[in-house]
Amino acid sequence: MTRWKIVTIVLVLVAIIAVSGSFYYLLTSGDGTSPRTPVTSVSKTNLTDGVRFTFSAWERITTWDQVRIYVSEGLHVESWEPSKDDFAGTGADSRVLLRNVTLGTKVIGCEIRDLVSNGFINQGDEFTIIGTQGLYLMTLVYEPTGGVVLQASFSIPVHD
């Protein structure tokens, strides 16, 4: 075989490998299965007996059953595990009240509002934490990676 034929074959093989690697990257980088924590932000609204967190748009499709909401008053930690099935067939603008949790002597609860009732966390969806007066830390974790999506401190004031 002549030298130019060998060089041509090598160049073709390198091109095939490069193109197939690029296609693999393009096909797997945004499919929702790659191990990367999605990014979003929330607006926080203080309420008389709690706080409401309202989501902006998420950078990737995320369902309620992919997140866990942790809350702590400094010594104890509890969590809520929403399910996208909670919203199936409930009509638009559904709300799901999750169980109350106890943090030492404090009791708090969580309500989720899914505007479209589709089980996906969309812009405008929100969750509200209400309960006993105190200072708390909320951490939203993306379960597939264990990564923290967001974290915020909040306080529930004394009720008159």
Image (cartoon, grey):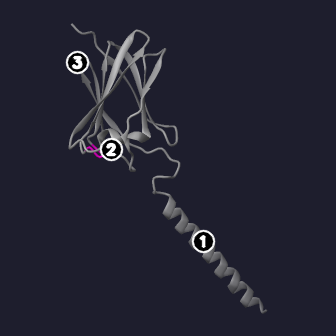
Secondary structure found at label 1: helix
Image position of 152 with respect to 144: above or below: above
Closer to the chain start, of discs 2 and 1, is 1
Look at mark 2 in the image and give the residue it sits on. Answer: 119
Residue, x 46% and y 16% (percent of image)? 74
Q: Is residue 76 left or right of residue 83?
A: right
Q: Check disc 2 and give the amino acid type.
A: Gly
Look at mark 3 in the image and give the residue it sits on. Answer: 48
Q: Is residue 95 left or right of residue 15?
A: left
Determine the main secondary structure of the stretch shown in magenta.
Answer: loop
The answer to which quarter of the image holds residue 100 is top left
Image position of 8 with respect to 130: above or below: below
Instruction: Give the tally of numbered discs.
Output: 3
Q: Which residues are magenta?
A: 117-123
Which marked residue is nearer to the observer: mark 1 or mark 3? 3
Closer to the chain start, of discs 3 and 2, is 3
Marks 1/3: CA–CA distance:
59 Å
Q: Check disc 1 and give the amino acid type.
A: Ala
Which marked residue is nearer to the observer: mark 3 or mark 2? 2
Query: Furthest residue to the bottom?
Result: 2
Residue, x 32% and y 46% (percent of image)? 57
The answer to which quarter of the image holds residue 103 is top left
Q: Could you say which disc has been placed on residue 18 in the image?
A: 1
Q: Is residue 34 left or right of residue 40?
A: right
